[in-house]
Amino acid sequence: MPRRRDTVEQEHDDKPVAAERLIFAKNFRKARIAAQLSQRDVRDKTGFAQSWVSEIETGKMSITIDNMAKLAHCVGVPLWQLLVPS
């Protein structure tokens, strides 16, 4: 079956992953590193589990818009910037 243009196959899973999820994942990780925060720092600031933050950054876990906003606030970047392809 051909791959849809707006999804990407994950390495270890046959389920397609929305391209937007991967864009957020990549941009959030870059913003976290630029803010000089570890995943544990994000955990401490947000209450989210470090393992969950890791899964978000790799695109393995889906995320709500509310949690995206909380993560964006944590790294000091407007949410819309984390959704723009680079």
Image (cartoon, rainbow, N blue to C red):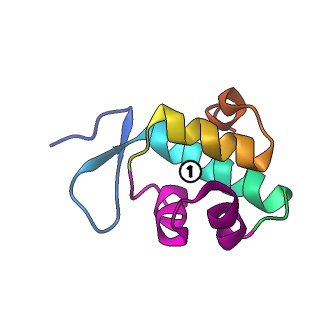
The total of numbered circles placed on residues is 1
Q: Which quadrant: the N terminus?
A: top left
Position of residue 78 in the picture relative to residue 65 (left or right): right
Q: Nearer the viewer, residue 43 or 59?
A: 43
Disc 1 element:
helix
Residue 21 or 64: which is nearer the viewer? 64
Q: Which residue appears at 68% of the width and 41% of the height?
A: 72
Task: Give the percent coordinates (x, y) of residue 32.
Answer: 74, 57
Percent across and percent down for residue 63 are 43, 44
Q: Nearer the viewer, residue 2 or 47?
A: 47
**Residue, disc 1:** 25
Tell me: 46 left or right of 30. Answer: left
Q: Give neighbour class at mark 1: few <14, some 14-19, many 20+ (Cα, 10 Å).
A: many
Q: Magenta segment: does it hold 43?
A: yes
- Most extreme residue toward the left, as rendered? 1
Q: Residues in magenta? A: 38-61
The residue sitting at 48% across, 36% down in the picture is 20
